[in-house]
Amino acid sequence: MDKDLILFDDLVRCVADGSATEEELRTLARMMRSDPRFAKRYALQMHVHALLTCQMGQEWPEAETAVTANGRDVWRWVAAAAAAVAVTALGWIWTLGLGGPRASRPGADCIATVVSSRHGQWADGREVTAGTVLLAGVWEWQGGLVELVTRDRTVLLVEAPASLEIVNALYARLLSGKLVVRMAEGCSGFVVETPKMTVLDLGTEFGVSVSPTGESQVQVYNGKVRAETAGKASRRELKAGESVRADEKGGLVEESYDEKRFIRRFPPVMIPGRPSGALYSRSRVETARVAYARRPVAADGDLSEWDRRAAFKSACAAPYAEAYWLEGLMMYDAANLYLAAHVGDPDPLCNAAPAGFEFAGGSVIVRVSTDPALGWPLKGTLVEDGPGSYRLNPLTAETTSDGIATLVMWHDAQAGRARLKLERGIDQHDQQVDPPGDWRGVFRKDADGRGYTLEYVIPWRLLKCGERPPRAGDTLAALWMVHWSDAEGRIARGQLVEVTNHQPHKGETTPPYCYFQNGPSWGRAVYLPEGE
Amino acid sequence: MKNVTTDLSERLAGAQFDLYAFVSVLMRGADEVADVLQETNMTILKHGANYDPSRPFLPWARGVARNCIAKFYSARSRERLVFDEALMDRIAEWVPCVTDERPLEDLTRLRHCMARLAARQRDFVTARYIRGEAVKDIAAREKCSEGAVSMMLHRVRQLLANCMERERARAGGCA
């Protein structure tokens, strides 16, 4: 036994040093199988090795202190050592509050606290204020950038519009919007679930996004994460500088890394002289009048050929009404739909939002039904009515109809030109950015730099109704939305939703910024006869 | 996930130290240990409904970890498999247990036992485990062979293991 013991201990030493060869491991295993005492010896020694491994970076107590330490001191040291377990893989210990004084531990139900907000706005339009305590549940923001800190010190940077279900201090579901997760130094273990994938943090900083259509993407800034699609169809470990999105087939598709895809740090300075608080609107217009275009319309940003009498006007609530407003215009003829808008915007034409979230950097969105058979109000919906609970409904023919189009119009600050994103159906399928076809668009900044004009020509063919475009007398569904951003064109500043159904309707309890997913909430577009 | 309670996540948080040590004993490689630990955490959170709160949490959590280790190796090339399933079960039986009430008890024991080491022994452990120095760097500084440093560390681990065993016995074990 002595000779075997020396050999065995030497093999255990090699395992602990990380230098054991395969042959040595086989010998070790053979010895443990033959004599259970070896298994016990191995377990005890490797257990000590594991405990010591957790001490990396910890302050080591002096021997004298250790001997005389009272129970409280011991506990403090043990708590610190326990927290160091996170160095290897964990971020859980702090959930117990062991890392700090128990008196400072928030209530058991408090999972996160708002520590900063830049233009943060809750779903109901209220301003987000620092210090707000978040319990488990679904939280929704319609604008701004909000920084949360969980009780185990994980920083969550929410870029609105966003909907986030906080399950516990280490588990959240991102239903829409963008989220950057940054764990405390050396910690890991945060999980973000999206409709199409789950992201496991392995000691890192990463961003996760869920587009309005549910497209999920993750990008790693530091450390690594493990991404797996729903049902674990695909699984991949990503390191810093890598990004993937979940595709329709349950696969993970590599995406190019874009440093600016997410906002990683909270902007520290407010712009002097700008009001703070919530920026939103209450819809005043139910019907948009679509005038017949008697003359050709040039997309040049000059609205002199437009009959402004058919325009509708709207503005954000006080104190923003003077700076954030919309004048919307629609015209048509046999070949085209014409859209124009004059928008009050203190930070015009600076959209720098990443792909998939183009609307958030400043945009005008017009949604139209072109199919008279769909009637008004629209029936299709993606949401269930009921306060605070809306989820995907089974898709109906109305929801997926190609006779419904969404036109997202924005000025790409980097490209220096007008862009168009076309989506079909309330479910926003067949998305195309700058779709092929003879569409034209232009943005022009106001002379005083406090707003802009846009003018677009959209062929009916592009909207798949070239053979039977809307005619005089048609009443079809429509919805307008304007998004404003901060001066960098990255943070959604607020929005205006206009041309909505003011009558009681199914789904009216959903928040206005979700009206686009609920056909009955859309307002009317009345196509006027020529000369009216 | 709707039924995952704060209580469960707090129990899981308290179990992390023990789960880490348990998994580390049965596997080799920091990355593998971290992966299995994450999988264990996920499994516990997702299937928390399977846990009977009237029974001790830590043994149940160790069982989940044990299954995750098996799953880890079954899903991969077995070249990293150090020990077969039966042997892992045998080793797992000897990994010291802790109670739900005092999940960090072994850390306390470790501290007490560390305090009883000779100064030079403590210096070696501090260099290797606290400062994370490589064995060859310690050897160069101490002007001795790497084998000697490795042996010294091994002896210290044995001393600590024996010391902690005595303390466990004095405390009466987990029962």
Image (cartoon, coloured by chain):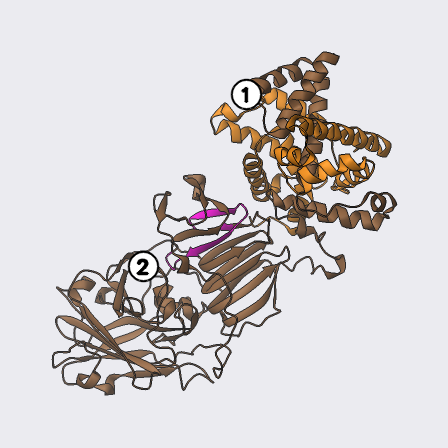
Chain colours: A brown, B orange
Q: Is residue A400 magenta?
A: no
A59 horizontally vs A312: left or right:
right
Quadrant hosting residue A381: bottom left
How far from the left and from the top, in percent, is residue A401? 26, 59
From this view, report whether residue A156 is shown above or below residue B85.
Answer: below
* Parent chain of label 1: A
How far from the left and from the top, in percent, is residue A29? 62, 18
On whether disc 1 and disc 2 are found on a single subunit, the reply is: yes
How far from the left and from the top, in percent, is residue B157? 73, 30
Q: Residues within 10 Å of mark 1 (few under 14, many from 20)?
A: few
| Residue farthest front in this picture | B143
Q: Which mark is residue B110?
A: none
Q: Please give the residue where the numbered disc 1 appears in the rendered image.
A: A22
Marks 1/2: CA–CA distance: 56 Å
Q: Which of the marked residues, 1 or 2, is nearer the chain's N terminus?
A: 1
Question: Magenta segment, which residues?
Answer: A192-213
Circle 2 SS class: loop
* Parent chain of label 2: A
Q: Can residue A164 be spotted in the picture?
A: yes
Q: Which mark is residue A428?
A: 2
Amino acid type indicated by mark 2:
Gln
Q: Nearer the viewer, residue A68 or B107?
A: A68
Quadrant the N terminus of chain A occupies: top right
Amino acid type indicated by mark 1:
Glu
Of circles 1 and 2, the one toward us is 1
Q: Residues within 10 Å of mark 2 (few under 14, many from 20)?
A: many
Circle 1 SS class: helix
